[in-house]
Image (cartoon, coloured by chain):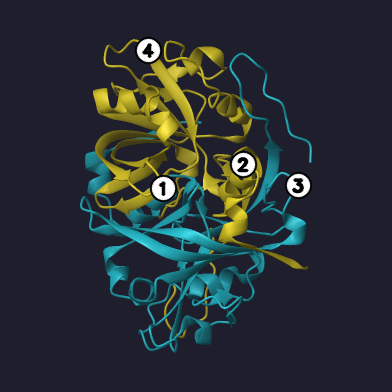
Chain colours: A yellow, B cyan
Amino acid sequence: MSNRVIQREELSEMEHLFKINLVNSITGYKSANLIGTIDEASQQTNLAVFSSVTHFGSEPPLVGFVLRPTTVLRGTYNNIKKTGYYTINHINASIIEDAHHTSAKYPAEISEFDQTNLTAAFENGFVAPYVKEARVKIGLEFKQEIPIELNGTILILGQIKELIIPEECLLKDGFLDLNAAETVAISGLDAYHLPKRLARFEYARPNQAIQKIKN
Amino acid sequence: MSNRVIQREELSEMEHLFKINLVNSITGYKSANLIGTIDEASQQTNLAVFSSVTHFGSEPPLVGFVLRPTTVLRGTYNNIKKTGYYTINHINASIIEDAHHTSAKYPAEISEFDQTNLTAAFENGFVAPYVKEARVKIGLEFKQEIPIELNGTILILGQIKELIIPEECLLKDGFLDLNAAETVAISGLDAYHLPKRLARFEYARPNQAIQKIKN
């Protein structure tokens, strides 16, 4: 297997689409989520696919995601800032086309829920809409926005308010079986993958062989 | 399929291990990378598994990852701050046990490269060590650390200096075939998965059916 080495200067001069396909692929697999919001008047919903949702800590339970400068003017950001709440919904194998469709640039007055087969579900009195067809869902409260001056993106941090999880996916030790939930992963800008577990390993300790967890 | 709804208060009161297993699972699949560094004297190497490496932008090409407070005193952070450089190496299916082993708390004077079957490779004159057994590798220059005051973690942002990619994994449009590279994804604290592509979709446009990319 021969390797291609690409230096920063060569990368910078690459054709735009080639470059964004490559740089979006290079960090590995990404989480695949739909972020649901509603406007201040509780009238107009918004739904958008994000591949940057990242775990930031367990106590308090913090989740982050990155907004590009071009998305800042759009629904997700405005709705989160106005209402203070949003939902994160796992994309599963049966909704990947509709999930991808939410990345189309619809005007603010059109809800992606109306343009796809995805359904807005208001559950447990939560302000923002969940995606009915998603199996694993998080209700979040906005906590902080951190401007990334290096490129004009914004890191949005939120705290988990509630979780909705299929009983059969929650194992005895708290591990969530994402394979059973058919949660997908994204690579690059446009590829959706179904992962299959190779192994779970016990907590690693110095000078001890790694043991598989059986469950 | 019946759902379990977990509110913030219940989550907070859960047994520690149950809670961290759950909250670490809840954002979906995560990238699986080994971060390689070396100390200021170019003597002592360090290697650690991270599941928080995230794409932050393509121009400039920016990559972020999250350091927990407990890891700040350890090798990765100190070495990056002192030398200004680090490598990110995709974990592939054949090195998952050794990759997990790097999470064991070895003292600073012991290199994880010496405790595992993973090999430090100094390539193209880059300061920090790559993992020889990894197939997709990124050399990065440290740009900024952003303290997350909500929980004491630190977001480390770096710019891509060079990429090392198997020729056969780089498609004509810049998309990197992570399936061919056998790159894995992580879920929770300890599960390693091999994803398989379901589809790539064309750029989504309003009121147009989603088309698959054939390649």
Q: Earlier in the sequence, mark 4 or mark 2?
A: 2
- Residue beneath disc 3: B172
Answer whether labels 3 and 4 touch (C-beta < 8 Å): no
Task: Give the label, 3 or 2, closer to the camera.
Answer: 2
Identify the disc placed on residue A54.
Answer: 1
* Spatial separation of the CA atoms under disc 3 and disc 1: 29 Å
B140 relative position to A73: left or right: right
Instruction: From the image, state whether disc 4 or disc 2 is nearer to you.
Output: 2
A83 w.r.t. B198: above or below: above
Q: Position of residue B154 (x, y in %)?
A: 30, 59
Discs 3, 1 touching: Cβ within 8 Å = no
**Residue at the spot of label 2:** A16
Q: Residue at x 68, y 59 (%)?
A: B182
Q: CA distance from mark 1 to mark 4?
A: 27 Å
Image position of B191 with respect to A107: above or below: below
Number of marks present in the image shown: 4
